[in-house]
Amino acid sequence: MKEKRKTEREQETAFDHEKLEVYQVALEYLALIHETLSTFPAGSADLKDQLGRAGSSIVLNIPEGNAKPRHSRDRRKFFRIALGSAQESAGGWDVARIRVYCSSESATLAKRRLHRIVCMLCRMVR
């Protein structure tokens, strides 16, 4: 009997969390902020660091929560941490816009991605 060959996509996806849409969007968001934060002016290191750490927190807490048993408190706890980091990030983009560290368009684009993440995480913590 022939073994079923895995598709290239299946070989790339070795972990369950990689199949989650929220994780994929969080990765896209992290790439977006990495690109945008590199354009922030001198003197913005505090906010760059905060937004970078919050973005990483979103990405890192989704897999940790997903590894916990379904419907467990621990699972929801990690998804809530990711949710809090996403909401914190939304405020950070408002600060960046007000301090003119980025354009309104850049802040709006980041916040749109965050809104998608927040909506999905809200469903996951129920």
Image: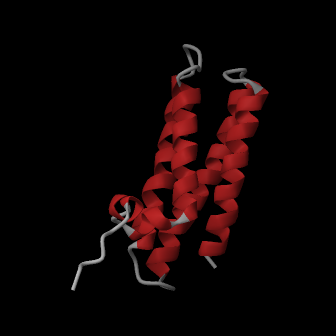
Quadrant occupied by the N terminus: bottom left
x, y percentage for residue 124?
60, 74
Percent x, y of residue 22: 57, 61
24 is higher (above) or lower (below) than 104: below
Q: Is residue 44 visible to us here?
A: yes
Most foreground residue, 47 or 124: 124
Q: Position of residue 90 (x, y in %)?
A: 68, 45
Residue depicted at 30% across the width and 76% down the height: 4
Q: Residue at x 51, y 24 (%)?
A: 45
Residue 54 in sight here: no
Judge whether 58 appears above or below 10 on screen. Answer: above
**Left-right relation of 111 to 71:** right
- The answer to which image quadrant residue 100 occupies is top right
Residue extending farthest to the left is 1
Left or right: 87 in relation to 74: right
Residue furthest out toward the front = 1
Q: Is residue 38 above or below residue 107?
A: above
Q: Quadrant of residue 8?
A: bottom left
**Residue found at x 73% / y 47%:** 112
The C terminus is located in which quarter?
A: bottom right
Side of 90 relative to 32 (left or right): right
Quick one: 7 or 46, which is closer to the camera? 7
Looking at the rendered structure, the number of numbered marks drawn on it comes to 0
* Rendered residue at 65%/66% (across/down): 120
Q: Is 99 situated left or right of 38 in this image?
A: right
